[in-house]
Image (tube, rainbow, N blue to C red):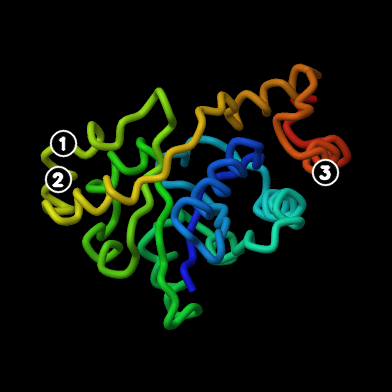
Amino acid sequence: MRIGIFGGSFDPVHTGHLIVAECCREQASLDRVLFVPAAIQPHKQDRSLATGAHRLAMLALATGGHPSFAVSSDEVDRGGVSYSIETVQSLSSHHSGDELLLILGPDALAGLPTWREPEKILSMAKLIAVERAGIDTIATVLDTASLASLLGPAGVAAVVASRVICSAIGIRASDLRSAVAAGHSIRYRTPRAVEQYIASHGLYRTA
């Protein structure tokens, strides 16, 4: 089975996340896309997240109608700062015999050389680079000395050849949080069930 690992804060999950996941599922021929919300992302330690329980619940609502989407509580259960190497190792032990593919946007791909044990990550999972049509060019992202050195010529060529191209969706979780705090609508930017969950649990309100 080919399993795409889609990590992030998902605070909250929104339509853009779901579109990226579906593009990856289809273009990369994935059998499953596994959404893995972080307990604490290494580069977002200065920001408070909605609890892991809330983010897992919202993901379950957002993905529940898709037979190839699933949600993992691996990082939330582990707690603390979430490092991809620990997640890949954990998922490998639970999905023995399956092929793991790490879904990365341009910024995450560019930062890969700074991650904890990136070489070990690459030994356990392949990469799916997501390119937003008209905005990103994965070949340009790969044209950095540190990333090219990490991947090697064959690895660079493989990432370019297997990249996934999605429409550019101008939705950011931070914008949804700000809209909720200001009392504005977030309809159509996140699934209706997630919108209702946010309202019923009072998430992202300032008072």
Q: CA distance from mark 1 to mark 2?
A: 6 Å
Kindly indicate the quadrant of the structure image that contains residue 184. Answer: top right
Badge 1 element: loop
Residue position for label 2: 148
Residue 203 in which image quadrant: top right
Inter-mark Cα distance, 2 to 3: 42 Å
Q: CA distance from mark 3 to mark 1?
A: 41 Å
Q: Which mark is residue 193?
A: 3
Label of residue 131 in the image = none
x and y percent of residue 194 in the render?
78, 42
Q: Which residue is mark 1?
A: 144
Whether residues under marks 2 and 3 lie with C-beta atoms below 8 angstroms apart, the answer is no
Q: Amino acid at mark 3?
A: Ala
Residue sitting at x 65%, y 37%: 15
The residue located at (88%, 40%) in the rendering is: 200
Marks 1/2 in contact by CB < 8 Å: the verdict is yes
Crowding near the residue tagged with mark 1, few <14, some 14–19, many ≥20 C-alpha atoms within 10 Å: few
Instruction: Inspect the image, locate mark 1, and give the three-letter code of the amino acid beneath it.
Output: Thr
Residue 189, given in percent of the width and then of the height, sits at 70, 30
Please report whichever mark, 2 or 3, sits nearer to the chain's N-terminal start.
Answer: 2
Q: Quadrant of the C terminus?
A: top right
Q: Nearer the viewer, residue 19 or 81?
A: 19
- If you read the primary sequence from the N terminus, does the residue marked by circle 3 or circle 1 appear first? 1
